[in-house]
């Protein structure tokens, strides 16, 4: 770690940024909602901002519409200290929108407006390769694999980052309504599986990818591949399980009053990456890794206590306060 406690290596996050429209009233269907608030989102962008909130350095690579919403989103990244020189604007396509309703239990339902949205139209030729090559960690999801040309841009960016020595971090972030079918989602998510050094899946994604209804070590290890350094299975309010070549175990969660789970996984990932970007030896030291995962779980927990992802992403001092309070 740097002397002042903040990470100095660059974490580059690749993929989609969009606007979530969230009902002004919780626990209602989209049709029943009397009105909507606009909330910036998109998992890779959330991760980039989660990193800078915690004192790390991040950049976002993706494409936005050359419209009011696209420029608003680019502005939010810049206000949060995220490097924006990997962003392209498309004159012919709109920034993606998602209408997200929170059910009474705090879980989410989505309806997407992307036909096609700007993020889907990023081409390999538009990538800022110098920025990608400067990444210590390159982080991405699977939504950018759904259609061309974005899929080719995604594959090229991964290859360039890997060749430049970056740690590849993958959070599939399954959004089934966006895929043509569940089979296609499973196939494409798995198509880049063996390239990643760090993979994080939720319990729901684990079930989806393995076809098993068991959230156990055997099920998780069926997703292991020889190049993997760390596999994480997040368990919502139950914490997370971790697997490396030499050890595995679990870390408990923090009990907080959950208002909205949006962005909790992104906050968790951002915290993990910020802590390991300058010191990847943590991945081979169980005691240190557990400490980092406790911190990441605290960040995820804090994010569930407020509505929306980006406004709820914590600072390091907020996370440390929750850690000191214990779970």
Image (cartoon, rainbow, N blue to C red):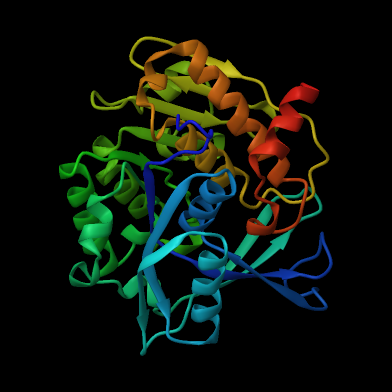
Count how many numbered circles sit on residues in the image. Answer: 0
191 horizontally vs 65: left or right: left
User: Which residue is at a point 23% across and 48% down the rendered structure image?
Assistant: 161
Give the quadrant of the C terminus.
Answer: top right
User: Which residue is at a point 55% across and 34% down the rendered structure image?
Assistant: 203
Q: Residue furthest left?
A: 163
Give the quadrant of the N terminus.
Answer: top left
User: Which residue is at a point 47% across and 29% down the rendered structure image?
Assistant: 232
In this picture, is 104 found above or below 190? below
Using the rendered view, name the quadrant where residue 178 is placed.
bottom left
In this picture, is 283 found above or below 130? above
143 horizontally vs 296: left or right: left
Residue 48, x across and y down, in percent: 48, 53
Q: Residue furthest front?
A: 3
Residue 247, x across and y down, in percent: 42, 10
In this picture, is 153 found above or below 238? below
Residue 193 visible at all: yes
Residue 55, x across and y down, in percent: 54, 44
Residue 73, x across and y down, in percent: 53, 72
Identify which residue, 240 or 191, lies in the foreground: 240
60 horizontally vs 109: left or right: left
Identify which residue, 230 or 61, lies in the foreground: 61
User: Which residue is at a point 27% across and 26% down the rendered structure image?
Assistant: 225
Residue 215 visible at all: no
69 horizontally vs 13: left or right: right
Using the rendered view, name the quadrant where residue 319 is placed.
top right
């Amino acid at each position: 770690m740097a002397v002042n406690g903040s990470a100095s290596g660059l974490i580059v996050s690749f993929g989609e940024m969009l606007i979530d429209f969230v009902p002004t009233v919780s626990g209602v269907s989209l049709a029943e909602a009397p009105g909507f608030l606009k909330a910036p989102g998109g998992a890779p962008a959330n991760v980039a901002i989660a990193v800078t909130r915690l004192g790390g350095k991040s950049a976002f690579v993706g494409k936005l519409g050359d419209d009011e919403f696209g420029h608003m989103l680019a502005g939010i990244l810049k206000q949060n200290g995220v490097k924006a020189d990997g962003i392209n604007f498309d004159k012919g396509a709109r920034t993606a929108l998602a209408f997200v309703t929170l059910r009474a239990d705090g879980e989410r339902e989505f309806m997407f407006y992307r036909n096609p949205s700007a993020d889907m139209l990023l081409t390999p030729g538009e990538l800022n390769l110098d920025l990608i090559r400067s990444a210590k960690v390159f982080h991405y999801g699977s939504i950018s694999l759904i259609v061309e040309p974005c899929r080719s841009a995604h594959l090229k960016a991964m290859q360039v980052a890997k060749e430049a020595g970056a740690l590849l971090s993958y959070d599939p972030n399954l959004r089934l309504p966006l895929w043509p079918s569940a089979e296609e989602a499973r196939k494409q998510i798995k198509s880049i599986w063996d390239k990643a050094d760090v993979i994080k899946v939720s319990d729901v994604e684990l079930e989806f990818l393995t076809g098993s209804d068991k959230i156990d070590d055997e099920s998780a290890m069926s997703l292991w591949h020889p190049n993997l350094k760390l596999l994480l299975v997040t368990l919502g309010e139950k914490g997370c399980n971790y697997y490396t070549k030499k050890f595995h175990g679990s870390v408990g969660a923090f009990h907080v009053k959950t208002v909205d789970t949006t962005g909790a996984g992104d906050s968790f990932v951002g915290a993990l990456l910020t802590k390991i970007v300058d010191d990847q030896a943590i991945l081979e030291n169980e005691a240190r890794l557990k400490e980092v995962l406790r911190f990441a779980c605290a960040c995820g927990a804090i994010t569930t206590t407020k509505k929306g992802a980006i406004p709820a992403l914590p600072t390091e001092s907020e996370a440390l306060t929750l850690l000191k309070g214990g779970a």
